[in-house]
Image: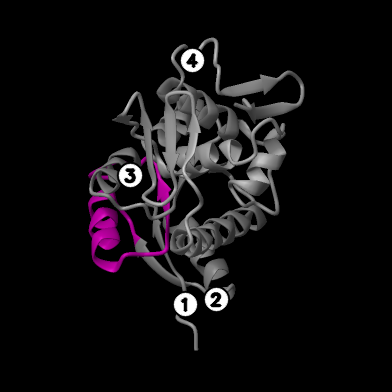
Amino acid sequence: MEEKKRVLIVEDEKSIVDIVRFNLEKEGYAVLTAYDGEAGLSAARENKPDLILLDVMLPKRNGFDVCRILREEGDNVPVIILTAREGESDKVLGLEIGADDYITKPFSMRELLARVKANIRRTAMLQAEAEEPAAVITAGDLTINPGNYQVSKHGSPVDLTQREYELLVFLAGHPGRVYSRTDLMEQVWNYDYVGDDVRTVDVTVRRLREKIEDDPASPALILTKRGVGYYFAAQ
């Protein structure tokens, strides 16, 4: 029998934990819980879950700190930030420190379950792809090596989050082809069900441009087709 995928919920509101845990267990996941940031960090380190649902506002240590520390330790476990609807800056900061996505409270359980499933499935796909890496991609002074997950510019390594790397590899692997935000949510984020909020894509593109473009305000690699979406410049 296949081992159950483990989801760690780090959330201090017990009512939210209870309903999310109930629905995840009904879908066949094993669920771990923590009610403050310190406990969440310890649980992540000790149990190596397949995904973390991480609230921002937590006792002892906030969710941003937990995510940042895990990423600094080299842990690429998928992290979905839980944040208040009005917390736009929270969403952006979460993505900048390496969270894979965010979902706003109050959230639809359907959407939450879809995102959990998509992120866990994406991790399995990445592991399979790592066994048969694609060819090295070069674009000007930018080099992408899928074999070792390395990106370099002018010969120096570029520090990307997992999601930024995946978006870059996808776009660079299909040069000249324009993808809408919804396309990218489906292809890169692997979401069959996409909520109304696709700002995640815009934030990730902006962050990626800041890291790989000579002039992010006038990009030469990741371009925008106004009213349609984004594409990687054909070399």
Classify mark 2: helix, strand or loop. loop
Pick the residue in front: 139 or 169.
139
Q: Look at the numbered discs 1 and 2 and tell me whether their residues touch, using CB distance below 8 Å.
A: yes
Picture coordinates of residue 138 (x, y %)?
A: 48, 33
Mark 3: few/some/many CA within 10 Å (<14, 14-19, 20+) = many
Q: Is residue 5 left or right of residue 38?
A: right
Residue at 57% in and 36% down: 172
Residue at 41% in and 30% down: 93
Q: Earlier in the sequence, mark 4 or mark 1?
A: 1
Query: Which label was assigned to residue 4?
Result: 1
Q: What separation in Å lies between label 1 and label 2 (alpha carbons)?
A: 7 Å
Of labels 4 and 3, the one closer to you = 4
Residue annotated with mark 3: 67
Query: Which label was assigned to residue 216?
Result: 4
Picture coordinates of residue 221 (x, y %)?
A: 55, 23
Q: Amino acid at mark 2?
A: Gly
Q: Amino acid at mark 4?
A: Pro
Compared to residue 27, the image places residue 113 above or below, namely above
Q: What separation in Å lies between label 2 and label 3 (alpha carbons)?
A: 25 Å
Q: Is residue 148 left or right of residue 175?
A: left
Residue annotated with mark 2: 28
Q: State how many labels appear.
A: 4
Residue 109, by quadrant, is bottom right
Pick the residue in front: 79 or 53.
79
Of labels 2 and 4, the one closer to you = 4
Q: Which residues are magenta?
A: 34-62
- Residue 153 among magenta residues: no
